Every structure is written in structure tokens, then in C-alpha cells.
Amino acid sequence: MDIEDVSIWHNKKGSRFYAMFHTHDFIGMITLKNGIDWENSNQYKPFTKSLNLVDDSLLKPDRMECPFLYQENGQPKVLAPAIKKGNESYSVFVPIKKNMANIYNKKMDLRLQDKVIVVTGGDKGIGNGICNVLADEGAVPVIIGRKEHDVQKAVDAIKQKGGKAFYAIAELTNPEECRNAIKKVVKEFGRIDGLVNNAGVNDGVGLEHGNYEDFKRSLERNVGHYYLMAHHTLPELKKSGGSIVNIGSKTSVTGQGGTSGYAAANGARNSLTREWAVELLPYAIRVNAVIVAECYTPLYDRWIKTFENPEEKLKEITDKIPLENRMTSAEEIANAVVFLLSEKSSHTTGQLIYVDGGYTHLDRALTKPSN
């Protein structure tokens, strides 16, 4: 096997080093043993010559575990777990035809490069996850938040990893500040390509122990600004043919108890998603919603800690999430949102997409399966 090119890189989440190599027909990967300074280029050259000695049984597709090829600065790379035979660790050879390499790309060319996407509450939790995935796809997330320190910190974090980001400060319950935030974005970029209405809080305004003033305030905090931001971004979305994604909660469907304001606001978010999808059909502006059930965010952490035994309560919840008995990650929600913002979902509108591991619609009485 003639090796045409080899490069070494490190998996920052662990201690394993990887080598990617080219032959005439294949792009492949080998995992390198731990504890060796593979950053010294002279140390891996002899190792690559031993590739032709690798056990042929390791090359069979049924022995390969999830090859994952992507490009970084135009350079194809592969990540895959090491394959072990008995108690011995083997280097892994994952052959991939060069002309098939692009189907394993890490990024699904969503055509979001330099698209300006406004995200309310993008400095923390789910909103921050959305902003990071947008930046990874080459878009420019614009974080709208009320605490400049938190917003600036989120923007700086995106920029530090090579992404683009911008922000505007606004108290979202203030109509004038919402209007000014959008004006700032348009002044900076001259366009807006998408809107993610995400900000909100489960404020616990219930029926028995609540009051009308707090109920109205909850609606204002949780759905009023959805209307305001959509209204103010609409002129730009009409020009760009952009789209809107509203983030909602399972409480609109399942109820929760003790949170009338939040549940009502989320019901309104669902209804507005359908209403706006109809109203904006003439402009080909798509409007969809991503509905969240159990996602561990800073706000969720604060809520779970109100229980006497937070760990026991959390386990009680996750055991009833049908798919894998775990919480949904912010990134998993973000992936769905970013897809809906992209041209890849060009004929999807008026939909409520539940990214919740089956928690809302499958049997919530399902218990954790036995091992």
C-alpha cells in the first residue's frame, strides 16, 4: 500500500491521536496509541509503513464502527472508535472511496454561509446551542438579550472558535427596544435571513395561587415578543425570503400544573406558527416550530434544584423519556432548528416538530428497560 499523504491530529475531547492518510484509491484513518508524542512528525512515518501488516479481518465492514469523515480547511479527515480484538488494541483502517468522501462530510451544506439569523435569548441554554450550530454552519447568529455582559460573553465564545456573531441589547417586553434591536441589525448587515424566537421562562404563574396581573405579565414575557420580533423582522424577511422558527414547550400539549401563563403562551406560540405560515405564504416565508420537552439548561438546572432530592427527581424524569432514557441536548434541538432555517427544508412550513425523544407522544409511563 503506497501512502501518498499523512496528517496527524488530536481529539481534544480525549487523549487519542488520529492519522489520516491517502492512497491512490482510498482515504483512510488509523487510531494511534496513547502516550506517544505523535506531534513529532518523524515518529509516525515508520508507523504508516506497517499499515500493510494490519490484520485483514479488521478491514471488513462488519468490524468497522461508525466511520465519520469530514473536511477541515478543505482537508478530509476521519474519526472512528478504535476496534479491539480480545484484550489487544489494534490500529483501525477505515477505507473510504475518495469519490464517496463528500457523503461523510461533517457539515451538511445547509447553504447558510453568511446568512444573518436573529436569535432571542441566544446567550444561554437552547438559544446558545442554536447560535453555536449556526456559527458552525457559517451563518452569523445575532443574539438579542438584555444583559450585555452575558450576551458579549456568548458572542466572544463563538468568535474565539472562528465563527461570526453579533448582538443587540433589548428588554424583550419593551416594544421600542425590540424595534431598535432590529434596526441595529439591519444597519450593521443590511439584511436579515431568519428569526428564531426562543426567549422565555417557565415562571410558575398558576391558577389557584396566581393572579390576573401576573398571568398577563407571563403572556407578555413568553409570547408577546414573539409577535414583536416577527413583526419588526418581516420587512427584511420579505426581501430575503427568510424563515422563522418558534421554540415551544410540551406544556402546550401535556400541561404541567401550576403554570397557566407559560402553558397558555406556548399554546399561542403553536397557533401563531400556523397562522403566520398561512399569512406569509405569498412571500414564500416559511414558519415552523420546534417543541422541547426535557432539555437540561441553566433554567432547568435551577428548577430541578428546587426539589428536596434533585438527583432522584431528575432520574424519575429521564427514566420516562422513551428514547435512551436521557435528556435532549441543546445541540440536538439546535440541529433541528438550523435545518428548518435552511433551504434543505424548503417545502416545510406550518409544522410543529417535537425534538423530545418521544416524551410527548409516546407512552410516558414507559419505564427504563432492564439490562
Image (spheres, rainbow, N blue to C red):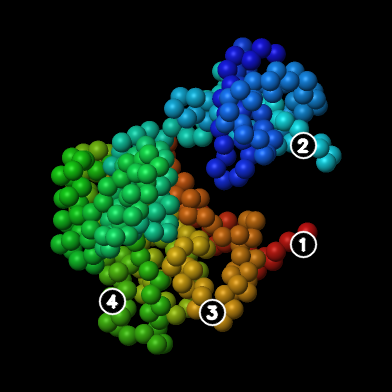
Question: Residue 89: which numbered mark, if any?
Answer: 2
Give how far apart the Cα atoms at labels 2 and 1 are: 30 Å
Marks 4 and 1, the one that precedes in the sequence: 4
Q: Name the residue under label 3.
A: 307
Q: Mark 4 points at which residue?
A: 216
Q: Which of marks 4 and 3 is nearer the N terminus?
A: 4
Q: Are marks 2 and 1 in contact (CB under 8 Å)?
A: no
User: Would residue 197 be seen by someone viewing this image from the given angle?
Assistant: no
Which three-letter amino acid code belongs to the residue tagged 2? Answer: Ser
- Residue found at the far right of this picture: 86
The reply to whether the C-beta atoms of the residues labelled 3 and 2 are less than 8 Å apart is no
Please tell me which residue lies in front, 265 or 30: 30
Judging depth in this view, the residue of 356 and 253 nearest the camera is 356
What residue is shown with label 1? 370
Label 1 or label 3, whichever lies nearer to me, is 3
Tell us which disc is closer to us: 4 or 3: 3
Rendered-image quadrant of the C terminus: bottom right
Q: Distance between the residues labelled 4 and 1?
A: 46 Å
Q: Which of 238 and 294 is in front in this view?
A: 294
- Say which residue appears at 45% left-offset and 58% top-offset: 291
Q: Residue at x 66, y 12 (%)?
A: 2
Q: Which amino acid does label 3 sit on?
A: Phe
- Of the image marks 4 and 2, the number of the one nearer the N terminus: 2
What's the residue at 30%, 80% (across, down)?
214
Going by the numbered disc 4, the residue's amino acid type is Lys
**What is the CA distance from the residue labelled 4 to the residue labelled 2?**
62 Å
Residue 83: which quarter of the image?
Answer: top right
Q: Where is residue 86 in the image (x, y as percent from the top left)?
A: 84, 39
Whole-angstrom CA distance, mark 1 to mark 3, is 27 Å
Rendered position, 188 above or below 368:
above
Q: What residue type is labelled 1?
A: Ser
For the residue carrying disc 3, how many other residues have a C-alpha within 10 Å: few (<14), some (14-19), or many (20+)? few
